[in-house]
Amino acid sequence: MNYRGRFAPSPTGHLHFGSLVAAVGSWLCARHAGGEWLLRVEDIDPPREMPGSAESILAALPAFGLVVDAPPLFQSRRIAAYDVAFEQLKAADLVFPCWCSRNDLAGGLHLDGQCLAPPAEGRAPAWRLRVPDIELTFDDVLQGPQTQNLRLAAGDFVIRRVEGYYAYQLACVVDDAFQGITQVVRGNDLLDSTARQIFLQRCLGLPTPGYLHLPLALDGEGRKLSKSERAHPVDPTDPLPSLRRALEFLDLPASPLARDPANLLAHALSYFRPERLPHCSERAAA
Ligand code: GLU
């Protein structure tokens, strides 16, 4: 099968250093494999989105030399596909409606495939997946063998929210399959979601791609960078400094001689081997 990778930003702000690292890492893996690199805009959570963010990210990528092989897929236009997946789970009795409030669950209440609150008249439920007591294992190319007890780690997780929005986990697996993604390369903050996604793929009869989780970029105080993105902006009008920092973060050469981003990326690609990427789970951004 031909390699197909993707970058899947949520339009919650401008491209920042952490997302540039994910974009560069997934682009390098795809190009190294002679494969395709696709883009997906994960715009299915309107309350978290920032107006203009998707356009800003889409315009920034080519400025960093990151050119995609197909028009971007917008998740906001894929609701019908998520409806189909949801109906499939419903028909197989793998989901249940739940009226439990955050407060109910904060007290450590354990759902066991059913809602513990009485159905509320006129109030829409969230829909949760029935999660069995299983240990799910997978191999991450960089982070190594992973095991997660799904019930302990995630419980009966929400796949459709009270407001009617589909959860990231569901939309992500439906679209990774739809786009024919063979390897997911992304930041290590999503390592924890992977077992849930593999479980959902099994429930829906979808293929499981390979996974490679890049070290998470942290700020000087050890926080995930996106939380303090103003401290580490990337400037598409002056792309070389941030692109050099992103390559160095991935232990790749950042040629001082390169005059443009395409040149800099081509030079790094010639040295690139996925297995030589840093194997740590997180590291400070320079
Ligand atoms: N949209 C997610 C984010 O921006 C990434 C999802 C993924 O790569 O699976 O954090």
Image: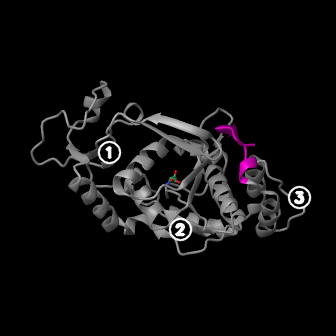
Queried whether the magenta region covers residue 206, the answer comes back as no
Mark whose residue sits in front, 1 or 2: 1
Q: Earlier in the sequence, mark 3 or mark 1?
A: 1
Q: How far apart are the two marked residues, 1 and 2, measured between alpha carbons?
A: 29 Å
- In the picture of the structure, the residue carrying the numbered disc 3 is 256
Report the quarter where the N terminus lies: bottom right
Q: Residue furthest top?
A: 107
Query: Magenta segment, which residues?
Result: 274-286
Q: Type of residue at label 2?
A: Glu
Is residue 72 shown left or right of residue 203? right
- In the picture of the structure, the residue carrying the numbered disc 2 is 55
Q: Earlier in the sequence, mark 1 or mark 2?
A: 2
Residue 62, labelled with which disc?
A: none
- In the picture of the structure, the residue carrying the numbered disc 1 is 158
149 over 77 or under it: above or below: above
Q: Residue furthest right?
A: 257
